[in-house]
Image: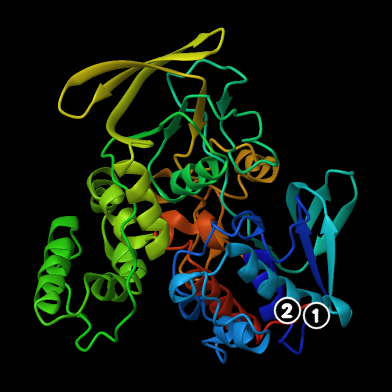
Amino acid sequence: MAGSLTAIALAKLQQIESITVFDRHGAFGRGLAYSAKSPWHRINVPAYKMGGVGAEDTEGFADWLGATGQANWRDYSDSFVPRWVYGDYIAAQLSAIAGSGHATMHTDVIEHLERRQSGYELTRSSGERQTFDIVLLCLGNPSPSPFPGIETSPRSITDVWAPGALDPIGPNDRVLVIGTGATAVDVVIDLNRRSMQQPITIISRRGLLPLIDAPAQTDPTPLENWPEPTTRGIFAALLKDTRQKMATGIPWQTSVDTFRLQIGRLWTGASLTERERFSRHLRAIWLVHRHRLAPDVAQSLNRLQSERNLNVLAGRIINARVTPTGYDVAIHRRGGIAMQMTADWILNCTGPEERYDRIENPLVRSMLASGIAQRGNNGLGLDVDEACRIRDRAGEVQTGLYAIGHATRGAFWEVTAATNIRQQILSIADALKTTTIR
């Protein structure tokens, strides 16, 4: 999706002569998230919060829903529409610029990148090489790394979004899901729709499920005067602001959304120690408040729990030993309680790998090995400057080489929402207006 948004934004620049988009899966306009085809796989915010494709159309997606007769779907509370619909929207914009001859699209893997005097030479999996003046890496979300302590087996599924990944799971199978975030919720709802007869167990260290979203309200007094950028100070101020506003009838979601727009600046200004402290102690709490659920999806989870078809555990897996039918799993529950369980399947829903020296992407591996890129702050993503330009191993900015979205986590933290990705793209496009590009 980020690559498509980038192409759409850059196509508006008069000096752009051509745009080439590569996607290993051919999911142009959609990416992983917006390729989901099931109607219960929803965007986790009301449609109007998704914005448009440019600075001038802040409600572009909602307007498109109205123009195509999809704005008032009664099946989707408060217009928490299926993710594939947003994919349709982006794909339609991308198709328009491709149809005009302004962009070409290739289903291929880029395996290597080298700096040349005339720009950057990319090597495709076919061996073909092409040179470009500007390269923007829109890599999406990497798959989770294999979970430690779990022996390798066909009954362990690391990439739950791979085509047909869940198909081998039978209705009477016992499933253990690692992770309790948005991906885990998607998988639970998906399995429930397949008429699972056995309770599904999901586990994370804190056992926290994403919280429910609420209709947005304008923040009458956005908090802007933050204390010294420490984890304790910032979140104490946020908590105080939230409680004061809740006392006047303003939902806590409003304060969190206001804070989300400022977290990049606060993250950048914080020390590495404070960033590590946040990641270690508050990351899980922040994510369940940040990535929220559509009201009816939250109701479905509550129903599954009340009917004892979903067990949520707070704890960690000590080990999982392969058996002829699955796994014997040793768990240390939060509070010191040890337990054993058997599972026919273990599904890794811990979220995308954030440490890019661990991911399997051949281009990233090549760039780190050659030194044209290095790991980002606290080991997260790739190292970029404030303009999203990639730094090499010596810390030098690589002019014309950018990273967008998840790969910039170490620099800005809040980088995965469509609104954040769009802001990065528009800032880069503004900077490129004074650049001659072929």
Evaluate whether residue 172 shows in this view.
yes
On the image, the x and y values in percent for residue 314 come to 26, 34
In the displayed structure, does residue 382 sit left or right of residue 341?
right
In the rendered structure, the answer to whether residue 330 lies left or right of residue 328 reads left
Q: Is residue 343 left or right of residue 401?
A: left
Tag 2–tag 1 contact (CB < 8 Å): yes
The residue lying at 83 percent from left, 48 percent from top is 124
Give neighbour class at mark 2: few <14, some 14-19, many 20+ (Cα, 10 Å). Answer: some
The circle drawn on residue 97 is 1
Q: CA distance from mark 2 to mark 1?
A: 7 Å
Q: Which quadrant of the figure contains the N terminus?
A: bottom right
Residue furthest toward the top? 324
Residue 241, above or below 278: below
Circle on res. 427: none
Q: Residues within 10 Å of mark 1 (few under 14, many from 20)?
A: some
Query: Given the image, on which type of amino acid does mark 1 rest?
Result: Ile
Picture layout, residue 297 above or below residue 56: above
Q: Which mark is residue 93?
A: 2
Q: In x, y percent, where is residue 22?
A: 77, 58
Give the secondary structure at mark 2.
helix
Does 352 appear above or below 105? Answer: above
| Residue at (44% x, 39% y) in the render | 350
Nearer to the camera, 307 or 100: 307
Number of dots carrying numbers = 2
Q: Nearer the viewer, residue 401 or 208?
A: 208
Residue located at (57% from left, 65% from top): 82
Which amino acid type is shown beneath numbered disc 2?
Gln
Observer-side mark, 2 or 1, equals: 2
- Name the residue: 36% across, 17% down: 341
